[in-house]
Amino acid sequence: MTSVNIIEAFAEKNRCYQIGAPLYPQGIMLHSVGCAQPSAAVFARSFNQYQPSGASVCVHAFAQADGTVYQLLPWEMRGWHCGGSANSTHIGVEITEPSAGMTRDEAAEQIAGTYRTAVALFAELCKQYDLDPVQDGVLIGHAEGHRRGAASNHADPELLWQQYRTGCTMDGFRRDVAEAMAKEDREEVPDMPRYDSVAEMPQWARADAQRLIDRGALQGNTDGKLDVSEDMLRTMIVCQRMVDEQKET
């Protein structure tokens, strides 16, 4: 999964930031910027004013193709990103768009990059706020928000994807976010302590471990180090106790 580099660039001069209304995220809305500008940093700078282009607007973050995300608002601050009631329920994220000078191949790669960045960011936020990405209404595009009566009349981000014939859809996006979350869960392996001697083990395990050593069931490596993980130790102790119980019966 694409790693995300979130740069906090809070738009402290923006009227939305200064009001600082709270948000309890129930979902995330995906936008595209609607102009030929691939740099999220450019938008971060331009939004750090009281009313960007004279409008009361502010989105939570801009995502660019290389995995970089510029965060303009805290996730739990209400944004002004969709012109409707979803401002009160959804975090708003904009993906940048290809510049005018890009070839079609370069533009396609830029769009693919922002898609990957958005998938990774949305997966991270869904985990953080315990959101189900495939549940109805949780992850939506601006156009979907309009069709639901919760946002202004915009066609993004699908319009961008359709213009460049990427094959991307919001349904596919939601599935990709869910898969990214599942993949991360599969890859997460907790650090498991390993012990080279009985003295290093927790108190609860020492007597059983010594009996395993005395019986030759736990011998360690050629250096005399046991090199046994906590999971291995628990399993061996349970098996030893089961054997002892069987002998007693």
Image (spheres, helix red, strand yellow):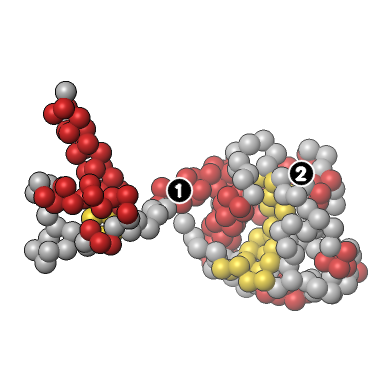
The x and y percentages for residue 123 are 56, 51
Image quarter (top left, top right, bottom left or bottom right) of the C terminus = top left
Label 1 SS: helix
Q: Quadrant of residue 135?
A: top right
The x and y percentages for residue 19 are 88, 64
**Frontmost residue, 12 versus 245:** 245
Q: In this view, does 167 lie to the left or right of 88?
A: left
**Frontmost residue, 213 versus 57:** 213
Label 2 SS: helix
The x and y percentages for residue 178 are 53, 44
Q: Quadrant of residue 124?
A: bottom right
Q: Residue at x 12, y 60 (%)?
A: 221
Q: Which amino acid does label 1 sit on?
A: Asp
Residue denoted by label 2 = 145
User: What crowding class fits label 1: few (fewer than 14 Cα within 10 Å), some (14-19), or many (20 or more)?
Assistant: few
User: What crowding class fits label 2: few (fewer than 14 Cα within 10 Å), some (14-19), or many (20 or more)?
Assistant: many
Q: Quadrant of residue 235?
A: top left
Q: Which residue is drawn at 23% across and 55% down?
A: 228
Q: Which of marks 1 and 2 is nearer the N terminus?
A: 2
Q: Is residue 231 visible?
A: yes
Q: Is residue 162 visible?
A: no
Residue 185, which numbered label? 1
